[in-house]
Amino acid sequence: MNKKYKALLAAALVSPMLLTTSCIDEVEPTNGVIQEQLESNAKATEAIVWGMSSHLNQCPTITEDQAYDWGYGSIMHSRDVMGEDLVVSYSGYDWYQRWSTANRALNEEYMSCQFSWLFFSEQVLMANNAIKAIAADVTDTDLMALRGAALGFRAATYLDMARSYEFLPNNYQSSVNRYNHDVTGYTVPIVTEKTTEEQSRNNPRVTHDVMVKFIIGDLEEAVNLFTKSKKTVPAKTLPSLGVIYGLLARTYLWDASYTEENLPYQSGISAMEAYQKAADYAQLAIEKSGATPLTRDEWLSTTNGFNDLSVSSWMWGMQYSNEDRAVTSGLLNWTSWMSNETSFGYASAGPFLQISASLYDQISDRDFRKLSYVAPEGSPLSGQEKYVSADLAEKLEFGPYYSLKFRPGSGNIDDNLIACSVGVPLMRVEEMYLIKAEAIAHINPTEGATILRDFMQKYRNSSYRFTGATTDDVVAEVILQKRIELWGEGQIFFDYKRLNLDITRSYRGTNFDNAAALYNTTGRPAWMNYVIVRTEGNNNKAVTEWNNPPCGDVMTPVK
C-alpha cells in the first residue's frame, strides 16, 4: 500500500466526534477589521466583498481531520449523494457515507452536522460584513454594484439554508419534535448586519413566509442597486444582475411548490402567481446574463469540461487558485472528489463517481450529455467516450457509468496545482430554461412542454420528442432533464425535496453497491430535513426546543 493510500485510510477511519465550538460565537466578527476602517478604506471594502467568494473554497472550516471539510463544494456533493442520481462506489475512503446512508451522523451531536451549519454561518458573516461596509444610501456606482453582489450572496446563502433546514412532512417521522412543537415550515434564524450579540442569543427559527420575504427583500434591493448603478461585477465569482434574477427564480419556484402542497406559513401569493414569477425571473436571468447553453464541444472537452468559468453558459461560479489551501492539499477540493480522471485525490482512490444506472438508461443515445459517462459493454456508445488519459482509465479500471463530466484543470491528471485550480458552477443558464419550463407547466402544461422541447431540440438533441400532455407528465419530464443537465452540481436535492419525490436506489441492475445506502422511499426521505447542530442551541436558547426531529436512523434500507 503506497503512502497516499495509507494517509487516506488513516483519515477515513477517524470517527465522527462531538464539537463544542459555539456557532453563535462564530457569527461574530473575529478578523480585527472594524467598521470605521472599512468605511475609510476603499481597498478594505473591496477586499471584504471578495472575501465572500474566497470563503466558498475555505479549507477547513473545522478541522482537516474530517476529509469532507473543504467548503461549499463539499456541501454541494453531500446534497447530491442524498439523492438517487449520483452513485459513489463503496469504499473505505468515502467520507460521504454519513450522508448517503442516512445514518445517525446527520443528527445534532455530530461533526458532520456541525460542518454544514458552521460553514453557512460563516458565509452569512462574510456577507453581513460586506453589506455593513457599504451604506444602503451609497452613491458611488461601483460600490452600489458591490453592495448588490453582497446582498445576492446573503440571499443565496439563506436560500440554501432555508431549503435545507426547513422541515417538510414525510412518511418516516413526525413533524412534532421531542418538546412537542410542530416544526413544519420552520427554516433557520436570520442574522443580519444589524443583529446584536444579545439578539443572537435568543434568535428563533423563522417560518417559511418570513424567510421568503427576507430573501426577496435582499434580492429586490440588489436589483435596484444594479439597475440604478448600471454597473456589473468584475468577475463571475460575484453575483451579477442576471444571477440575482436567477436567485429570484429559484426562490419563487421553492415558494410555489410549498404553497401548492398547502403547507402552513404561506407567503401570501398563490402558487400560480409564484410559478409565473419564477418563469418571468428565469427569463430575465437568461436575457440579462447574456449567457448561452453549453455546446457539445464545450460539454465534452477533455481540458476545459466543467472546470472553466469563462464559458458563456456559466452565470456564477467558484474559482480555485493554486495558492488556495484546498488546492495545495491535493485532497480537500472539488477535483479530488469530483473528477475520477486524476492520479491523485479521493475519487481515483476508490470512491469513483458514477451516474445511476436508472438515470443513464433514460438519456437518449442521441443526447451528447450521455457521453459524459462510460457506456456499458455492448452499448452503441461504447468506445465513443473521450478520456483525458485512456491509459489512466485502463489503469484505474473504469467501469460502466463512471463519470467523465468534471475534468481536471487543463486536462492535467498529475499536477494537483494545475488539476485542482478549476472553476465550479454555481448557476448555469440552462437551469433557467428548465425553471421556466417547469413553472409554466404548472400553469399551462402545453406551453411548458413547448418551452422544454424548444430547449432540448436547439441545445441538446435535435431529434428530441416528448408527447406528454398533463401537468404531472410535463413536470416529471422537465425534472428528468434537469437531473441529467445538472448532475453533480448540487442543485437537484432541492427539487426532490420541494416536489416530494421518491428516492429509488434498489432495483434490478442498480449500481448502488453499498447495502447501507439501498433506500427506496415513498416521497421525500426524512434525511432531507437537516437538523441544526446542538451547539447552536447551546448558544441560542430559542432554537433548542424548536429544532427538527433527528433524521438519522429513522429509515431502513431495503434488505
Image (cartoon, rainbow, N blue to C red):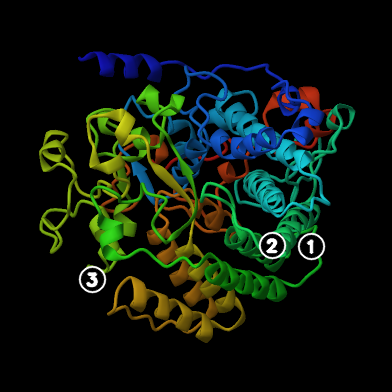
- Measured from the top left, where is residue 487 in percent x and y? 40, 53
Q: Is there a contact, CB below 8 Å, between mark 2 and mark 1?
A: yes
- Measured from the top left, where is residue 559 in percent x and y? 38, 40
Outermost residue toward the right? 198
Residue kind at label 1, given as amino acid type: Ser
Q: Earlier in the sequence, mark 2 or mark 1?
A: 2
Mark 2 surroundings: few (<14), some (14-19) or many (≥20) residues within 10 A: many
Q: Which mark is residue 69?
A: none
Q: Nearer the viewer, residue 409 or 551?
A: 409
| Left or right placement of residue 234 versus residue 29 in this view | left
Cα separation, mark 3 vs mark 2, equals 35 Å
- Measured from the top left, where is residue 528 in percent x and y? 58, 45
> Is disc 3 placed on a helix, strand or loop?
loop
| Left or right placement of residue 378 versus residue 200 in this view | left
> Is disc 2 placed on a helix, strand or loop?
helix
Q: Which mark is residue 255?
A: 2
Cα separation, mark 2 vs mark 1, equals 7 Å
- Measured from the top left, where is residue 159 in percent x and y? 66, 50
Residue under label 3:
366
Residue kind at label 3, given as amino acid type: Arg
Q: Which mark is residue 267?
A: 1
Q: Which quarter of the image is occupied by the N terminus? A: top left
Mark 1 surroundings: few (<14), some (14-19) or many (≥20) residues within 10 A: some
Mark 3 surroundings: few (<14), some (14-19) or many (≥20) residues within 10 A: some
